[in-house]
Image: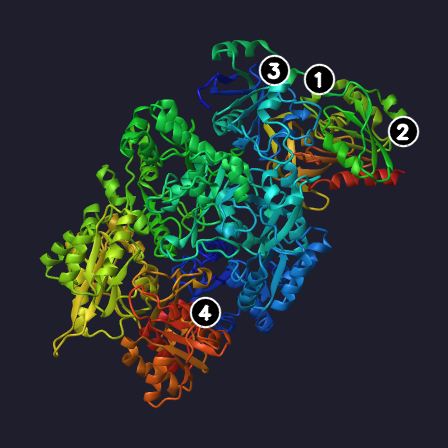
Amino acid sequence: MTNSKNAVLVLEDGTFYEGRSFGAAATTPGEIVFITSMTGYQEMLTDPSFAGQIVVPTYSLIGNYGINDSDFESCKIQVRGFVVREYCEVPSHWQKKTTLDEYLKASGIPGLSGIDTRSLTRHIRSLGVMMGMISSELSVAECMRELKKIPTYGVTDFVREVSTDHKYAWANEEKRPIKYKVAIVDTGLRYNIARILARLGCAVTVLPAATPPAEIMKLKPDGIVLSPGPGDPALLGDIIGNIKELLGKVPIMGICLGHQLIGRALGADTFKLKFGHRGANHPVRDLETGRIHITTQNHGYAIALETLKGGLEVSHINLNDGTVEGLRHNRLPIISIQYHSEGSPGPQDNVYLFERFVDMLKERK
Amino acid sequence: MTKPSKVLVIGSGPIIIGQAAEFDYAGTQACKSLREEGIITVLVNSNPATIMTDQGIADIVYIEPLTVDVVSRIIARERPDGLLPTLGGQTGLNLAVELAEAGILEKYNVRMLGTPLESIKQAEERSLFKKLIQDIGEPIPESTTVNSVEEAVKFSKELGLPLIIRPSFTLGGTGGGIARTIDELKSIVTNGLASSMTHQVLVERCLFGWKELEYEVMRDAANNCITICNMENIDPMGIHTGDSIVVAPSQTLTDKEYQMLRSASLKIIRALGIEGGCNIQFALTPSPLVAAKWAPDQLNPKQSEYYVIEVNPRVSRSSALASKATGYPIARVAAKIAVGKRLDEIPNKVTGKTMAAFEPALDYCVVKIPRWPFDKFITGDRTLGTQMKATGEVMAIDRCFEAALQKAIRSLEFGKKSLLWEGAGWGKDGTLDSYPLYPNDLRLWAIMAALRRGKSVEDISVHTGIDPWFIYKARNIVDMEKRLLAEPLSRNLLWEAKRLGFSDSQIGTLADRLPDQVRDQREEWQLRPVYKMVDTCAAEFDAETPYFYSTYEEENEAEPLDAQKALVIGSGPIRIGQGIEFDYCSVHSAWALQEAGYKSIMVNSNPETVSTDFDTSDRLYFEALDEESVRNIIQNESTLGNRFISCPSIVQFGGQTAINLAESLASNGLSIIGSSAEAIDIAEDRRRFESFLNGLGIPQPPGAGITSIKEALNTAAMLKYPVLVRPSYVLGGQAMEIVTSDEELTKYMTRALDLGSKHPVLIDKYFEGKEVEVDAICDGTDVLIPGIMEHIERAGVHSGDSIAVYPGINLTTMEVDTLVDYTVRMALGLKVRGLMNVQFVIMPGEHHEGSSVYVIEVNPRASRTIPFISKVTGIPMVRLATKVMLGISLKEQGYSTGLYKKQRLVGIKAPVFSMSKLIGVDTYLGPEMKSTGEVMGIDHNFESAMAKALMAAGLILPPKGTMLFSIADKNKNEALPIISGFYAQGYHLYATEGTAAMIKSHGMEVTAIEKKLSEGSPDIIDIINSGTIVGIVNTITGGRVALQDGFHIRRTAVERRIPCFTSLDTARAALRALTHSKGTYNVKPLPDYLG
């Protein structure tokens, strides 16, 4: 193994980091974001919310347990690129099927290793997220030129890229009796949402993001889940229009992007956070119980508290920066959370929210 | 819950194996934390060498024995409304339980704060614990609690062997073990029953080879729960976690596994109702390689399986490690929770922005390695198991595992043992078995050696049960070693080697250069380490914590402090001879710097200590204490752009570790404040010191510094045996011996030369006189002597193992004057700036002449007795000394030359040993230090103070019973009055044959034990084991020749927890305490004694 540098990460402000290429040898642009979860890189890689982004785990040793058959959150790698301090060449785990490097290679996704990811994280933290480019082919100057040409993350609708193109039923491996039918609008579904709902006795149907409301209602769902997903919710006017029609018809749970879409459907504004919330350690207060829950988060946009209207009330807030973390409607059966109650990666402390949702289904039945 | 107004905090007592400096750290943080809440804190601890027992940490401080009687009296006097039991280790916890059970807490209306008593019992009592865990549906290994050996054997028939045995209510795994055969089972259960407070042991399924994980969890009364971090033991299940190499966060767990164990942890802490912190241990499905040999049923699991192993319902060694590994102050937060605060109400002092209710994110890797005492106890059993043997530990942080591991090894200060070290004969027959890969303190070196010779990662993993991930990382290190040997040293190669944690000295060895040449090359190529912050949040927030580690990366976050400042060099891992006393000194020095308007910078490698708390100094570097790291830190602190900022070092307080750096720092032009490297050298260099004393006309026992066996024999012939031999530049009497023959001397020298110190061996005439110790502060003009300490045991017993009495009790005015005169002249002559410690021996005069005072040893640095003498005299010695170093004279600080006024009290410092943990180690007192900690007894007369010291040290004799005597012939005359004394007190006497004859001839009744060992039953060991004996006096025949019977007597005493005196001096003092104190003693706050 030699360590000569052969790839580069160039940021739009001209800062660059030289390192070693791993995964696919390629050139890719994306919004640079960091995530502080220490485990769960396989889940990160396959999280559709990372579409269009180059992801930097802050933990320095990535790939230790390889890639297995069971920890996928979607059908493919969603990140545009992966930047690590060190990736593990010889992972060890009984579930291991392949290595991080091989997995990225097979998916054509470039990785960059050996750079000072903490320095990069501090840079993003102080200046905010920005576009960048990984390349093992181009020079820094060439990357800068390319970066100027491409559309920025904020104007791109990634939901179209990540949503399923066809309706499908979630294969329920649980041996529990099915009590409810739940439709998930897939704007970037993470599998664990479907897994947990199935565990709670739901028959889950996953629908393309643009499915018209009438078609959704034709399924006679007991409830609808609006999934997480990538990008700026303000770009998703058509989906927001659909949601407006669904409000009040059946219980709705919005998660992450789904939560933002509910907010916007009821007239609230969203805004872009400086460097987002990405990690598995964010404390959130449930205002109903006063309890603090540790949550998994992955979002770059948030609902502007002062713009809430249309019967929405804050149910959860972020203990660190006071941003809105959850909403409930004062009349209609609607709950939403900005974070990932499904964890994966991250704590399983918030599964209670799915239970709350299922309770809503029970009440309505 | 209403907030209490006055809280009693119980400390953990002396440092013993399994209970070290971490509880000083926890207790200190807790007291500070409670005071912030406006609560009056009352602290009790018997250990004077702690920061927590200093004025200014708690409101009211008691340095008293940790017994129910003493603490009851404190409660009666102070009337606290709360008791915080979970910060004083197992000792504090057990005492709190005893107080509750004795009805004391109820009587005085004292509320147990934090974790309720019921929870403590549920977590500690195995049967209750098992039921609770099963009730909440968590998996726990099949087990049964037994009260007898027969029950254990019966269970083994049901479940098969091997089985693991754990006694209830002990610490450090005392009395536990793994039984692979029925005989082993019987013997371990017998021991376990004896060491359990409740005469109960748990026998359970053995999960050897499974991964071992720990989670640090916190919960508040509102049921908010968080995990602070998880840690993975590199050594799999089967080795006590205190003896395991540990990495944080876990490295080989998927997120699903991580969260599975995290969820289980939260469930358990909630079920227990803990309010504060706890530590939960799990076993988890191992890698298939390991499973194939160690856990066949885990070879093809459907999903990862786990078992809950153990819960510590309190702050622990692991929580101290977790605090330092993450930056999250667990004890501080636990104390606040105990008085009713919620996690979301407690600010995170590290970020200054967020709340304590979050989970730290690490962006680095932490490695902890235990520090074992086998460099001292070469005869000790090095095998590691469920009984902890390490005295301390080191931690290192870096961005990759290899570097963290290598830095941790550099921090161990194992003599010349870099990771390149290999044992003689390893691998000689080419098989894997020829490397010591069984669990032992050298296993890591054995793994490296095997890898170097091409043994496969897989084979080593199977053999050791260590996950292949870690072995692969070790192989990366070996691969780099090979490159350094083979390739020309390019910039890129050097950079990569530094990134993997190779020291300049290791690189030098491999690339055939001197360490300094490597350093120069680095400078030329501008390869310097940068410093990254430990900020709890992986850089997500802008943190305020001044806590740094070095790494070879791009960005440096530790901009040099632009102020007057100094670097305090700490003392590294707790080991025999260099204990918590030096951490105490380092902390006080940092505080004194701040008081004087300086910024204090601390460097240390020990995660257990107060010195490595993030708010002890203005800046903390968590680094190895070797020349390279310290020079790098100074370099980093000295250059701000093109400007030079002075950053002098203080080497006086970090024990021998720090003082050993003086020479190399000075020779590299780095400034040291306080006594110069020259003064240190004069004191340490035998020849220079001799001529220095000659110049002053001060006598010392005749002797010389020698470097060969021949020289040694010649010198000994001149001096006449017995002689005292020791290497120079060591602490704790490492390898110090009294030698009585040429044969012994030759043996000693062979070994000493083997150790490979570049310094000579010192050989002195051995004077068996009265030993006296003095600590002094000198500013160049004045020499202040706060007090004189007289040792109970005569010279020949290491000063660290002697009982020291302040003020001297048997010293004539003339002797005192001489001691003061010599001390003053030596301090001035050596140009000491700061502290100096002198050991004297006083020989009685012959033919009515006056006695003679000889200087045995001078050390121009802080000594082990500094905390003790500071406490009993009320003179803050480290503060004065640090200010003296900064140029503030003693006069300016209000002191002058000479012996400070004698206090109207008697303070006694007594050593405490951890012998029950160290199988195979002889316990007799000798010139080589063996104790791990100390306690203090203080009162207004000698007898009461002595009684309290013995009480605190666990050496107090019950008022009646049977004493056993086995006295060497040479001591028989001297022993007679002691034996008569015990007889007069009404003790029954048992004695070995010769001793019994002597006793009988003096008209006392005695039971003679006729049978020597292996001459049939009942032999002496059977009698000790039968519980008849309450105390033993046993002297050894001499030298290192362990009389087999004596050795077994002493070991059995240790295992049966029977006070055993191997020095007649100690026995005499114990008798005197017994005879005169009549069990009466004072219990009052420390300042009340000082009056």
Q: Amino acid at mark 3?
A: Thr
Residue with the mark numbered 4: B1052
Sequence-wise, the earlier of marks 3 and 1 is 3
Distance between mark 3 and mark 2 Cα atoms: 39 Å
Q: Amino acid at mark 1?
A: Glu
Sequence-wise, the earlier of marks 3 and 2 is 3
Question: 10 Å neighbourhood of mark 4: few (<14), some, or many (≥20)?
Answer: some
Residue with the mark numbered 3: A152
Q: Which mark is residue A161?
A: 1
Q: Are marks 4 and 2 on the same chain?
A: no
The relative height of residue B106 versus residue A284 in the rendered view (above or below) is: below
Q: Are marks 3 and 4 on the same chain?
A: no
Residue with the mark numbered 2: A220
Q: Which of B479 and B113 lies nearest the eye of the viewer?
A: B479
Question: 10 Å neighbourhood of mark 2: few (<14), some, or many (≥20)?
Answer: few
- Of tags 3 and 2, the one toward the viewer is 2
Distance between mark 4 and mark 1 Cα atoms: 75 Å
- Picture coordinates of residue B367, whole percent (x, y): 47, 42
Q: Which mark is residue B676?
A: none
